[in-house]
Amino acid sequence: MTTTQSTNTIQNLNPSTGELLAELPCATSEEVRDAVARARAAQPAWEALGMEERCRMLSGIADGLAERADELARLATQEMGKLYEDAKREVQGFTSMVKTELEEVQEALATQTFKTKGNETQLVRMPHGVVAAITPWNFPVGMPLQILGPALAAGNTVVFKPSEHVPLTGQAIAEIVQACVPEDVLVLVHGAGETGAELVAADIDMVGFVGSRETGKRIMESASKELKRLVLELGGKDPLVVFADSDLDAAAECAVRHSLRNTGQVCCAVERVYVEESAATEFEEKVAALAADWRHGDGFEEGSKMGPLVSEEQRAKVVTQVDAAISDGARLVMGGSCPDGPGWYYPATVLADVAADQRITHEETFGPVVSLSTFDGSEEEAVRLANDTPYGLGANVYSGDTERGARVAARMQAGQVGINQYLGGAPGTPWVGARQSGFGFLGGMEGHRQFTWPKSISKSV
Ligand code: ADP
């Protein structure tokens, strides 16, 4: 494992080499409670500053990120293995979003006035109080910022627990934010799942969480005791449907890039590809030709297109799923075995003839695997297969017939759908997971409002 919580320390290992980067103490139960108490004590004054002043202070995060951009990107690559170039883009992308996001929060949370004869009602957006921000490792800069920015801007204070796989990146983010705000408005705690569970059970008002579905369920169960508010952004098993009349080159590029990017460790990665039977052979050839170019290697090395998996445990999960798929009848087109040497590398792997009843079709893989299946070309079958999962994060459909693409997209049970492109588009729309991929939203006007509760104040006029 990259990182373990042995009673009370995090062993932070570099997944490219297995070398120890740092050993950090986990917060004790008492330290978690103390962190929450400090954040609670700081909250009223932070709220009283008002939205404009809070956002003015928080806008300094962009300068902090810019100043430490290279350090952050290096830390992310060392701690979780992603390509240094991708890590730099992640930092730059989120740096450039700080200002617009704060403007969007101000717009989303502005007081609204409703009038009727003799009455005027103001709808005010109130902060929840103390938010626990619990984040994953796959986008170690972006995921924390997606929660910290809007939660703080809304007037909450935050106790932040970064993933145990990326504690140093998390610490740097916390320092950047802490430099912009009064003491204890953001408090950092280190630790793994145990510490996260203690934080959720502590005297907090809301959890902002990005991570696995299983952990999300545990958090919901624990939070139910006091009906703490939740935003849970969870995993997915996203389908890509390819009709034979599609631009097959574009569809193959989408399948490969979005199955392999970040070594497949992306919650909205393409995890299942359904190709119309008549195009299956041609599509498989295109996918194999593209995937052959996805060389794995150290994230700092030029020429690497993907780094290692985050941990030995994560690699073992991928190995188990791929091996089981092959022994159950899937055909290995390329990859499929661990390379020798240090680091938790796994090659770009392509499987074909993957059947509906296989484990790899239902469980999130979170690894560099393009999983190809076929369908009979009917819309009915495409929709049925795409929706054959309890998840509902993203979905993608390619068809030369744009009306058919739109019809299939409308019936896909996913929060974000792409037609003849990978999902995701204009800024301002929230990050949504339908069904078991999420509870609540992040980003966009609707997402920002989740960090508040609406309060109506009425008076006679
Ligand atoms: P991943 O597979 O992405 O690591 P997890 O859901 O295991 O997903 O972890 C995401 C975050 O949730 C990490 O910060 C982790 O320490 C934290 N975590 C794990 N278990 C719990 C739990 N029971 N309660 C709260 N947080 C947890």
Image: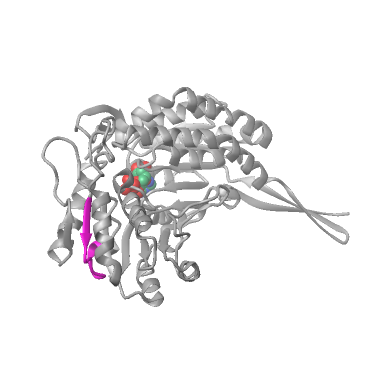
Q: How many marks?
A: 0
**Residue 357 is inside the magenta segment:** yes
The residue closer to the viewer here, 45 or 65, is 65
Tell which residue pokes out farthest to the left in this image: 340
Query: What is the x, y in percent for residue 145?
Result: 48, 38
92 lies above or below 314: above
User: Is 384 left or right of 430, judged from the image as shown?
Assistant: left
Q: Please say whether residue 294 is visible from this viewpoint.
A: yes
User: Is 150 left or right of 214, judged from the image as shown?
Assistant: right
The residue closer to the viewer here, 56 or 400, is 400
**Residue 417 is inside the magenta segment:** no
**Residue ID at (34%, 28%):** 74
User: Is 452 left or right of 167, judged from the image as shown?
Assistant: right
- Specify the quadrant that holds the C terminus: bottom right
Query: What is the x, y in percent for residue 106?
Result: 66, 41
- Specify the quadrant that holds the N terminus: top left
Q: Please say whether residue 50 is visible from this viewpoint.
A: no
The residue closer to the viewer here, 408 or 217, is 408
**Residue ID at (41%, 63%):** 398
Query: What is the x, y in percent for residue 220?
Result: 43, 55
The residue closer to the viewer here, 405 or 388, is 405
Tell which residue pokes out farthest to the top in this image: 67
426 lies above or below 195: below
**Residue ID at (34%, 37%):** 191
**Residue ID at (50%, 70%):** 403
The coloring applied to the image is one colour
Q: Magenta part of the protein: which range?
A: 349-360
422 lies above or below 244: above
Query: What is the x, y in percent for residue 411?
Result: 47, 70
